[in-house]
Image (cartoon, grey):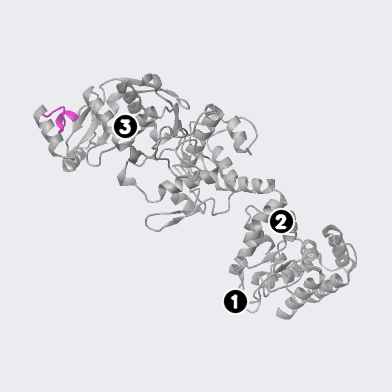
Amino acid sequence: MGGVRTALYNYLYAKQRGGDFILRIEDTDSNRFVPGAEQYIIEALNWCGIIPDEGVDAAGRVVETPSERHPHAPYRQSQRRGIYRKYAEQLVASGDAYYAFDSPEALEKARSDAEAAGGTFTYNRQTRKSMRNSLTLPREEVERLLAETSHWTIRFKMPEDTVVCMDDMIRGHVEVNTDTLDDKVLWKRADELPTYHLANIVDDHLMEITEVIRGEEWLPSLPLHHLLYKAFGWEDTMPRFAHLPLLLKPVGNGKLSKRDGDKMGFPVFPLQWTGAGGEVSRGYREDGYFPEAFVNMLAMLGWNPGTEQELFSMEELVSSFSLSKVSKSGAKFNPEKARWFNKEYLRMKSDGQIADLFMPVLEGHGISAQREYVRDVVSFTKERATFVKDFWDIASSLFVAPEDFGKFDIKAGTAFSQPSSGRPADPRAKVYDDSLTAPFLAKDVDKFWKPEVVPLVEKVGEFVGAYQGDMAPEAFGAALEGFIKDNSWPMGKVMNATRLALTGAASGLGIADIIVRIGKAETERRISYAVQRL
């Protein structure tokens, strides 16, 4: 989620100013390489509608060769590895960097010695003088090691006691003394790849980047990046930086993590993700969220438009977005608010659009339904749903009878049909027990299906079969309530028991809404079955 939000804010900022949003794949850290991650990023951005102007083609592939539309290709840093050493060596030549030949064992010993003394080892202005590098070794030894060994790096030589003055587009003016900073590795001879610090500075310069909007975790690196631009002589073209606040846990303090989602039952990935070990993490797409709802929700995590408006199309976000209204403090994620956004976007869709989305869900349950009937069902149940898949839980009884999921007719025509062989998986089945009352909800049977009420439910069935009046839900509902009141029956008990007979549960849709849609004959049949079964 955090990565998508960062991409979204970059996209909105660029589009608002008529600029270009560039997707660059930063894959120079071989230790953190994850197979499939690159394609996942591209697919996730496409799902969200955050389409780069440079870096991918129409099919979502990273462009590898320069063209008129993609002048800065390739956009995968591992394919640009031949570029970076020249710039790293340039810094050594200017005295802004140096060669370091310290072995992993020597670095580990330095750390252990520092910890034994109650401190922490940092490769910086003080310790560099006692380490094995081109600042301490004879020139001849340096040349020999460069020629004969491959386990060396180029480190930035952090200037001593220098105040670095920076302006962040969100956090304002920032000053840092270089004595608090370490000598970061810029380039590694072992794999001939740069670290993030060198690669990003070089690529941002060559790709003519004007603004960099990234996560708060990169704020400590900002002084080094400023100093690198100065060392290269690129201060006049240095991009402006903005560091976004963290996404925080729904409860407590700390950065939002996958573990929070696993614990509280919500996704933290835009799409379902399968890790290297085979573990599967839920995705917003697979959980049934609309991409526009997901994007709208992300936009509001850390940004406030300054108005009461909460629902924004992508076009409205582009016109309204401003970094000046992005918070400096972390944004606490609320999973219920995410659901609220999806519910609102569901409501904004037409009944026809929702019907088209729900039809495949029905087909997944083995049901073929007429579109106009489905459209009618989603129309009057829409306020109850948050996701398209919810319509099955809400209104499955309008498509299939409780007892056998068999074929039956609606009114005069066949509104839907179900193969008689085999029962489709039903999410309601998890609450049915294995007793003789199944498939009726056992706790509702115990509570509402009383001997004194059963004859009354049968009378309701007879009333429905004989009814010749208006079958519009409102008119029929009034007639049914009048019939029960005229007989001085307990309204709640009769209605709950009737609903149980019709749907398998005592709570849910209105009795009139159910009867009008399944028809008189099916109503009588279901009541008869319930009386015999229970």
Residue drawn at (37%, 51%) of the image: 35
- Mark 1 or 2, closer to the camera: 2
Q: Is residue 451 magenta?
A: no
Query: Which three-letter amino acid code belongs to the residue tagged 1?
Result: Asp
Please, what secondary structure does the residue beneath circle 1 have?
loop
Residue drawn at (73%, 73%) of the image: 449
Q: Is residue 136 magenta?
A: yes
Please, what secondary structure does the residue beneath circle 3 have?
helix
Q: Mark 3 points at which residue?
A: 198
Category of crowding for the residue at label 1, using alpha-carbon neighbours closer than 10 angstroms: few (below 14), some (14–19), many (at least 20): few
For marks 3 and 1, the one nearer the N-term is 3
Which SS type dominates the magenta stretch? loop
Query: Which three-letter amino acid code belongs to the residue tagged 2?
Result: Val
Please, what secondary structure does the residue beneath circle 2 have?
helix
- Quadrant housing residue 406: bottom right
Task: Please give the label number shown on residue 434.
Answer: 1
| Residue bounds of the magenta highlight | 128-137
